[in-house]
Amino acid sequence: MSATTQAALPTARSMAWTPVAVTATGLVAVAALSRATDRGTPLALSLTVGALAALAVLALRDPAAALLAAVPLSAWRRRGLRLAWIAVAVLPVWLVVTALLPAAGLGTAFPALLALSTCALAVAVWVPDGKDPGRAAALPLLWVAAGSTVGSFGGPVGDVSLLWREHPWPLLAVAGVLLAAGSSR
Amino acid sequence: MTETAPVRTALTVEATGLVKRYGRTAAVDGIDLAVGPGVLGLLGPNGAGKTTLLRMLSTVLAPDSGSLRLLGRDPGVPQERVEVRRRLGYLPQNPRLYPSFTPLELVDYVAVLKEHTDVAWRRRECTRVLESVGMGDRMHHRIRTLSGGMQQRVALAAALLGSPELLLLDEPATGLDPEQRLELRSLLATSAQRGTVVLSTHNTGEVAALCHRVAVMREGRVWFLGTPAELIATAEGRVWESEDPDPTALRTWMTAAGTYRHIGAPPAGADLVAATLDDGYLLVSAGHQ
């Protein structure tokens, strides 16, 4: 068995799961409320996209990162393991939330989730040495909030604030390149 | 784990013109260093660049300029960096651990990340290193229940995994009581017989007891590199004591006996006393040799 495979379970144990559980519960509750009241669907969906993208970045937070900084198994593989685990954890949340919400808007939501997550991860890997990469978790939340508040204003600011929802694939491509370029950091 | 024949070289660390900047501040400013087997102590005030230098030597941080070879390899080349990492142990300053892990689980996890995939070997090695740092009887306790000194020893055990040829320790004695410090010295002396140990410390006593060579750093540069005896020699004839403070001295402090000890250029008729490593360090770190 390879070192990466053997590292999978202890990596899962090293991750902070309480924020994931709390966020998942909150998102499902909001989706259920939205369904029950038949209101706020776009907001619930945007909130879910932003929060799950933020969780992806928070998964990279490793309290023992300094101790593990000089191990031969690359930081990229260790991040990959963490992202795989968080993907496994948030997938059921995504399925439950999208099942609860009406179909309108769901078609673009998954690409938006991918685009926002990749953008935030790209920022996280390019955070300067000594700074907490977890701060990049604020990016998807702020972007979603901006889209919900100034998105309807139009103009360049409005367009940028909705980029993640309106043009997720080009955004995903650009963020993917930045993420790949920062993979050795 | 892919085994590669190690490149044998007398020098474990070869650094030339090493520079690392944070914005406009040069944390390491043109360091030349050649280190062979034995223990090298890095002394210097806070902010002298010791930690930045150790992070570069541990391949965690890439230098902005200058050349660096570790264990005969270039850590700037990804494949060679991995090979260097397989042969080094690194203890960062104030390392944080996973509170829900036991020491055995944590060290085993580090061993996996060091690409030791043989489970039986790992079990033996993890037990060995934990016992060597005096944590054998607590290896199954949760880390959250351990004191700061014990957690430091667990992190040290992780650095010792696989008997690395290059061991880099950033203030390893932090949180250790005097008895544990003695055990640490003995442990590092053993490690130095197998390879090179570079340790950063504020404790000149540790340097005197353990280090074959000492480097005094200040403002990102190495101001002195030599043996502890040579560092003491820099202060010979430049240390004196008196009943009163001496404003002409470079540094003055009151001793336990109530007299004043001074370093610098002694005035005529000064009561010269034998210099210590502390005196040599203070003299060099003040910019005078």
Image (cartoon, coloured by chain):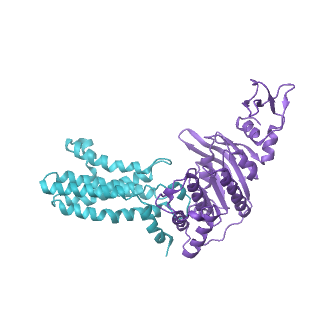
What is chain B's hue in the picture? purple
Could you tell me residue A156's position as x and y percent? 26, 42
- Does residue A133 appear left or right of residue B205 in this picture? left
Q: Quadrant of the C terminus of chain B?
A: top right
Could you tell me residue A25's position as x and y percent? 27, 57
* Number of marks in the rendered image: 0
> Could you say which quadrant of the image residue B216 lies in?
top right
For the question of whether residue B2 can be seen, the reply is no
Which residue is at a point 74% across and 36% down the rendered structure image?
B283
What is chain A's hue in the picture? cyan
Could you tell me residue A145's position as x and y percent? 26, 46
> Could you say which quadrant of the image residue A89 lies in?
bottom left
For the question of whether residue A181 can be seen, the reply is yes
Q: Quadrant of the N terminus of chain B?
A: bottom right
Which is nearer the eye, A3 or B149? Answer: B149
Is B268 above or below relative to B46?
Answer: above
Which residue is at a point 65% across and 65% down the rendered structure image?
B163
- Does residue B202 appear left or right of residue B288 in this picture? left
Which is nearer the eye, B215 or B67? Answer: B215
Which is nearer the eye, B138 or B236? Answer: B138
Which residue is at a point 74% across and 62% down the rendered structure image?
B193
- Does residue B26 appear left or right of residue B41 in this picture? left
Is B180 above or below relative to B247?
Answer: below
- Does residue A7 appear left or right of residue A102 in this picture? right
Is A56 above or below relative to A129?
Answer: below
Could you tell me residue B29's position as x and y percent? 63, 43
